[in-house]
Amino acid sequence: MQYKIHTLDLHFLQENSAIASFLIETSDGLVLIESGPETTFNYLVQEIEKIGFDWKEIKHLFLSHIHFDHAGAAWKLAQNGTRVYVHPIGLPHLQNPEKLWNSAAMIYGDDMGRLWGKMEPIDENLLVGVDDGDEIQIGNSSFKAWYTPGHAIHHNAYQLGNVMFTGDAAGVKIENGPVVPPCPPPDINIDLWKSSIQKMKEINPEFIYLTHFGRIDNPQKHFKELELILDDWANWMKPHFDVQASPDEITPKFMEYTKQQLLNAGVSQENVQKYEYANPSWMSVAGLLRYWKLKEQGRI
Ligand SMILES: [Zn+2]
């Protein structure tokens, strides 16, 4: 069956190809995958209007995970009665977002409003927890959740026939650039992430859709490249962790390392900036250091 899938560019920070939402036409109305942040809600509305629909027609919203760039505007849709599907670990945070907001504020500080806008609670009657293997039938379309932790402990990918919406579990790839793994704190777990990649390989979708950004036509090749660079980044960080270097010292070195990787792969200066918007490299320093710390302590 051929699905009508529209990739919506949310023009995050006025930039193209950084954050996407996906609109799917079913026989029982519109389904949205990812809401994007609250700050891009007007773009979401406009992009939906451009293809001839009204956002208020969206009855169902699937979230890959609860990070703000994926789920920040979910409450706006819920205020209109949209049902919101999310992994059960993420669900209470959408019902009561204060803790989520405060922990993100520890990372982003004063920049929270500019980047993410605001987040309000979602009525529990509209929240549906979906876990590994759960299938939600909407009209002629069946959405199957696959639990895919590693980037976040509350991460699902969603399969629709031969395609899969992979959130951040299949990394970030802007236009023809290389795939990179976003590694923000606090959940990064390289081992779990690799098992999630293995799982997606076995499901073997024909196409995958990345929230950052868009459709990938050769998922198997993409997954292999992701595994390699995930190890590469983790292994780059390990010796810095071993000598207990401070993040202030590591961050500029890691930013330079990842920037060079992109440039060497032929990415333009302009698109290096887009990669930074979609996946700020300084955040991956904190995430990877935390991973090695928990690993050393035997906690993961
Ligand atoms: Zn994320």
Image (spheres, rainbow, N blue to C red):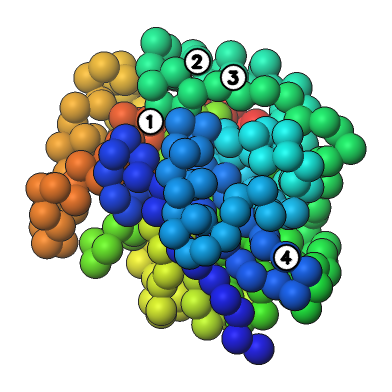
At which x and y percent is residue 107?
A: 45, 19
Q: Which mark is residue 105?
A: 2
Answer with the quarter of the image where residue 102 lies.
Answer: top right
Earlier residue among tags 3 and 4:
4
| Front tag of 1 and 4 | 4
* Circle 2: element type: helix
Using residue 190 as the reference point, say whether residue 162 is left or right of it.
right
Q: Is residue 187 above or below residue 118?
A: below
Earlier residue among tags 3 and 1:
3
Separation of marks 2 and 4 at Cα, in angstroms: 36 Å
* Circle 3: element type: helix
* Circle 4: element type: strand
Q: Amino acid at mark 2?
A: Ala
At which x and y percent is residue 231?
A: 39, 53
Answer with the quarter of the image where residue 235 lies.
Answer: top left
Q: Is residue 222 above or below residue 232?
A: below
Residue that appears at 67% across and 60% down: 31
Q: Amino acid at mark 3?
A: Trp
Using residue 138 as the reference point, say whether residue 51 is left or right of it.
left
Residue that appears at 76% across and 30% down: 122
Q: Amino acid at mark 4?
A: Gly
Q: Which residue is mark 1?
A: 283
Separation of marks 2 and 1 at Cα, in angstroms: 13 Å
| Front tag of 2 and 4 | 4
Q: Which residue is mark 4?
A: 29
| Front tag of 3 and 4 | 4
**Dot 4 beta carbon under 8 Å from ligand 1:** no
